[in-house]
Image: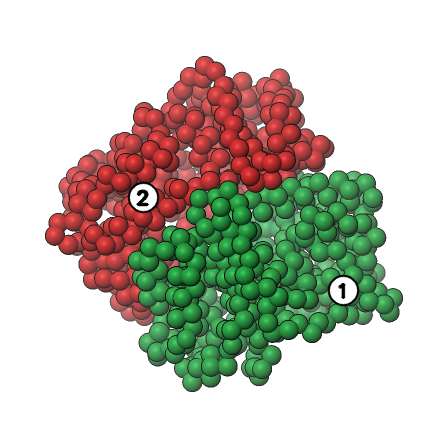
Amino acid sequence: MDYIKKEKKNYNLYIMKTNDFKVVNISFVFQRKNSMEDELYRTLLKRILFLKTAKYDSLEKLSSAGAEIYNPKVFVKTQTSSIYRTFNLRAEFINEKYTEDGMNKSNIEFIMDYFWHPFIKDDAFDKETFDLCKKNYIEELKSAKNYPEEYALDECWRSLNLYEFKLPTNEELIKILEGIDEKKLYSYYKSMFTEDSLDIFVVGDVTDDMETVIDDYIYGDFQKSVMLKPHEYTVSKVNKIKEKTDNPQSKLFLGYKMNNLTTYENEYVSLIFAMILGGGTESYLHSEARKKRSLCYYIYASCYNLFNVMIVSAGISAKNSKEVIKITEAEINRIKNGDVDDDKLTEVKQLYKNILLESKDSQMSLINNLVARVTKEADDIETRFKMVDKMSVDDIITLAGKVKLDTIFLLEGTE
Amino acid sequence: MKKKNFNNLNLDIYEEELENGLKIFVCPMNRYKIDARMTVNFGADILEFEKDGQMIKAPAGIAHFLEHKMFGKEDGTDITTIYEKNGALGNAYTDDHVTVYHFNSPVNFYDNLLALLRCVNEPYFTEENVTKEIGIIDQELKATLSEPDAIAYYVAKYNSYHYLPYKYPVIGTEDSIKQITKDNLYDVYNTFYTPSNMHLVVTGNVDPEEIVTFVRNYYKDISKREKPIIKTYNEPKQVAREKEIIHKDISNKVCFLNYKVDLSDFDISNFELQRYLNVLLLNKFSSLSGFNDITLKDENILSPVFWMLDVEDNFANFGFQAEVKNEDALLKLIEKQLTDLSISEEKLKLIKRNWINGYIINTDQVIQTSEIINGQIIKYGHVVYDALDCIRALNIQKAEEIFNKLDFSNKSLVIVQK
């Protein structure tokens, strides 16, 4: 689907017009070079902005005001590459054609108020609200191990060492957090108006007056945006990390890095490779480790193409960990040695194309695709069809040769 | 075939009941994705039923176990393989009330529909394949019970009930899973997987006539059978156990509080009653209520407070869960909210607006529309075509009349702590 780009004085506006849906989707993408503290500041910001605004000084008033205008969904999605970090203020609201006149303007203003008109006191965020957000964030970090799946993934990710700086542990994060106050967070927030870039995306039955509302609201001297690019690594030796838990089940995470990928390999082949290896109940890993040998309840492979990383995760009994690692390595080697059949590739390609086709059913998917086209130079949906269609077994075999195991993280349970 | 309209949502639904009792609901939508789901009215809350004139008992977790075993066929076919070869996403789930088998895909619809029908109509259980499944389900149980939230929830549910099988986790227990045999599976399959105890919902770019013809043809040799007879229980209003502390190596305490509330005294439709119960929760505990503004400031409450409502038999379960420093503080806040259940016109208007808004947004999407239709059939026994009118008609007088009759004195608290 086509879009138009409008270059404004301090930001770019991208509009994709469609009247296939009852809703309008908006995305405000802020982006800057990633530093260690960004994660903390942006997470705090994400929390504090949604509790109060300049107009509504409590969550109750803010929620009631949202309900009054048919409850727009507003949330923040963050994304990082090795070098850049985005803060994406996302929203979806019902087009006023299905509610009442004036609701489009009211919704856009309500959404933009979260970021452009926050609750500020004496050149700082409100101390009471800030302290609550900080307290909750610290408690979440302290209890991270209560959620073994997420915890093990985070630990594996940390060990992969994917950034220009070393990712701090939860204990280190808590220490840094303790040094942040409402004034520092406000300074960081203000810096986003000069140090971040801003791209705005609108998808739906977009009218000229929506553009005017946005234009009237925006202030800030934003930077020019840059493309998010995947990173290159070297893998010298495999990091093996083991932690104990009193849970019965163990969580095994294997972090793989992929080097020297072409753009085509990064965008397409690595994804299809991960789907063949561990993308569903008919994947090689699932067939071998669960169906044939009953070694685990689940085993999946996921691809993170902004990092050229693939993660294999499995829920297992501790005694089976070595065997599951062996099977995973053997299945990757099997593909590398050419043992991957055309039918399997055709099946997975079809599944991927179906997902692409279905993405046209959802305006949320359309805006995600538009954001990716602009921020990552991703292809549009039609081009993706063609690119996947031309993929051969040889492409998969070549890719398998570039996959290197970097980290084994085992959260070892009691059985 | 009857054509009905979901009011004010531009959705038509075609309803048909086959000679053998299978009900079919088709909702045409102009989208690529097509979703189909077959629901069996057999969930974890049924463990005792009549077979050959005698009441028999199955081990806890059998509905979920059966769901796992329905995908493998005698000729070696695995239904998930058919879905994947056809580029479809197919799966199943079991909850306390039903088992649902489903797929969605933009292509190969009839191949996938045939696979779905085979999935629920061709049982094949052997001692060997049942034993193998025990290991897999045991791992699933262990994964579920790794998180303190899940432990607190399941134990609170167990402690709330004396007799209803609802007290057990959907997946069963470590012991009950091991007791399941192929004979148990055939018993429950033959009793509950009968067309008159099932319904099919299809949503997407499809022709209703064509679907009904296809399904009717598939079922031509499968005749109508009697509806299953299920054991009823005389469940007391009181909870079985009021408090339990469980020790686990975690940093923050997690607690789950379940109010068991008797609903046997209400003479209104299930849909209406459940709407009003949800109004109560939204009015007192959602972000519209000011409750979150209070809990956020309370140093004894360390996470957002999650709440849920589930209705089983004649009881509503109002559940609350949070990480806490001190559970008494949370209890006090919840009790305070429950002592004054009045609601303003303004709040009721906002709650109604939120729901109507939800219907408008969700019926833009295939899966969500399918879930709305299926969810209503499961909960209320039929599609609530006038759902929006019912929501608009909710009023303060009725709300307060219902709220005043609710008794929140029976509760069970579970704390998971170091």
Residue that label 1 marks? B48
Q: Which mark is residue A43?
A: 2
Say what amino acid the circle numbered 2 marks.
Thr
Residue drawn at (45%, 32%) of the image? A155
Q: Position of residue A163 (x, y in %)?
A: 35, 27
> From this viewpoint, is residue B79 visible?
yes
Mark 1 is surrounded, within 10 Å at the Cα level, by few (under 14), some (14 to 19) or many (20 or more) other residues, namely: some
Rendered hue of chain B is green
Relative to B104, say whether A68 is above or below: below
Closest to the observer: B286 or B59?
B59
Q: Position of residue A272 (x, y in %)?
A: 54, 31
Residue drawn at (78%, 61%) of the image? B57
Say what amino acid the circle numbered 1 marks.
Glu
Mark 2 is surrounded, within 10 Å at the Cα level, by few (under 14), some (14 to 19) or many (20 or more) other residues, namely: some
Q: Which mark is residue A157?
A: none
For the N terminus of chain A, the quadrant is top left
Outermost left residue:
A122
Q: Position of residue A143 (x, y in %)?
A: 43, 43
Chain letter for the part of the structure drawn in red:
A
From the viewer's perspective, tell me whether residue A142 is left or right of residue B106.
Answer: left
Q: Position of residue B361 (x, y in %)?
A: 43, 61
Relative to A176, say whether A55 is above or below: below
